[in-house]
Amino acid sequence: MIDGFRETFAHVVATLTRILGPRHIALAEEVAQDSLVKALQMWPHEGVPANPSAWLIQVAKNRALDVLRREKWLADRSDVVAALVDAHAPAAAAGMRRFSGETITLRGEPAAVGDDDLAMIFLACHPILSREARVALTLKTVCGFGVGEIARALLSREDAIAQRLVRAKRQLRDADVRFELEPAEYALRLESALDVIYLLFNEGYAAHAGDDLIRTELCGEAIRLASLVADHPTLATPAVHALLALMLLQAARLPARVGDGAELQRLVDQDRSRWDQALIQRGMYHLDRAAAGDTLTTYHLEAGIAACHAAAARYEDTPWSRIVDLYDSLVVIKPTPIVALNRAIALSRLHGAPAGIAAIEAIAGDPALARYYLLPAAMGELMRESGDTVRAAEYFEVALECECSEPERRFLQKRLNDLRTDGRRP
Amino acid sequence: MSKYTLMLRESPEAFANFSPAELQAIFKRYSAWADGLRQASNLAGSQKLRDGDGRVVRRSGGRVMVTDGPFAEGKEVLGGLFVIEAGSYDEALRIANDCPHLDFGSIEVREVEILR
């Protein structure tokens, strides 16, 4: 058994991008890919080297030297040549080779995750790139996903993703950006990186139609990247800890989110014994660290809401009043219709269905919510609670016409069927 | 038991377009296959050949001709070989049949001839 190709690919890309400069990201990716192919072809014969990561980097460096020599790019770049012709070369080849009877992780030791990996996140999230480009480039170079996998994860087409990646790399080259991050850039670049990480997580968490495995990996990657930043002595701001806490607390509920019939399980129906307590503990730890200082970000508030749910042993223990308070603060700094809708739902738990219905009706005209299934789904639920089964059924029918994931669709269909069965009962 | 040589051929581009995760999955299959042979003591030796360095030497009309190997894209080249021990040619074929390489290229199976 062996794992870690994806992370190791990213580490090789980061190392080579540092040596060659951001203008050569495409070459760094190419030689990193070559190094994995060579490993695939050689290791079954020769065994896995004692330090696979160093071996792969050495192979990638040799390939880069070949390519750049052929392109005559190295003539006046003795510094780059020196970095590529590495003193560590013998070390990479040395040591016991292992055949894979045991489990071999290419790079599990945290010490091997270096500043290069971190710098690569900030490069891929460079503010000169569009948000979509940052996400795609991060998935490609920092997470080591293939173009096809990125397309599946983002529900996009392969050629569109490939084009977006080429354009992003060209932009970085034309702007002649540096690999190393200047302290003066920390704040702006960090904000962009957190935004991308949050987006990755939400793409994975959203449970849209599509490849489930890749979407779970997206959540895992977002948590891995945020953890990298959170471990850095100067970059780990309270906002970083807040975002990490938010994602850990949400991810803890993932195992309980889909029921045996593959339908979405609402919070009220979830089997809380399936929540991942280890993730909740980690989340609470980072939420605690997020409280240092006096910054209050949207991540803080959203993590606070997630913590309220995670800490409730039973649904009946949910502190709705505290949750509504947090939403009240959140709508101020993040005044989006989606936040307002979620606030309305929380309000209905605190003050009853009519309060929720009134709050939703107040925002129902917002065009951003026009095709969003959660609005009619929530209205249907609140109508049912109010005893108006006819209008409840109408709302669930509208919700089913909106775009939603398969688990969500199954849930809505079940609600609708239950209403109809109840309605026919004498 | 006789020795057989399995010659693995593939196009130089055979693995170029797989993602790292896919390459990992492919690597696992090759390793499992080779380790299975090793554990059953069926493996007498195995080598990967260097990519793209091969030339063909020939004498033609009193002159030695050196030409580049068959490395045109799309053409299969010899990438590596395994020498295995097997009871019969059919058993050697079965071992080759199980090799994941058949998804990416071809395998030529030849018995090593020895003086009886």
Image: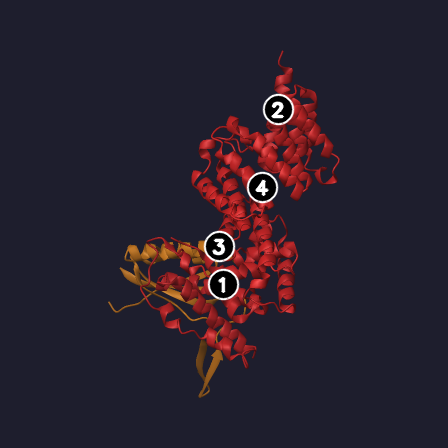
Chain colours: A red, B orange
Badge 3 vs badge 1, beta-carbon distance below 8 Å? no
Three-letter code for the amino acid on which mark 4 is drawn: Leu
Q: Which residue position holds label 4?
A: A301
Q: Residue A116's mark?
A: 1
Badge 4 vs badge 1, beta-carbon distance below 8 Å? no
> Along the polypeptide, which appears first: circle 1 or circle 2?
1
Q: Is residue A268 in view?
A: yes
Q: Which residue position holds label 2?
A: A417
Q: Between label 1 and label 2, give the one nearer the viewer.
A: 1
Q: Residue at x 66, y 39 (%)?
A: A338
Q: Secondary structure at mark 3?
A: helix
Three-letter code for the amino acid on which mark 3 is drawn: Leu
Disc 2 sits on a residue from what chain?
A
Q: Which residue position holds label 3?
A: A228
Q: CA distance from mark 1 to mark 2?
A: 54 Å
- Is residue A118 toward the left or the right of residue A346 in the image? left
> Along the polypeptide, which appears first: circle 4 or circle 3?
3
Disc 1 sits on a residue from what chain?
A
> Along the polypeptide, which appears first: circle 3 or circle 1?
1
Three-letter code for the amino acid on which mark 2 is drawn: Asn
Q: Residue at x 43, y 69 (%)?
A: A58
Q: Residue at x 64, y 20 (%)?
A: A420
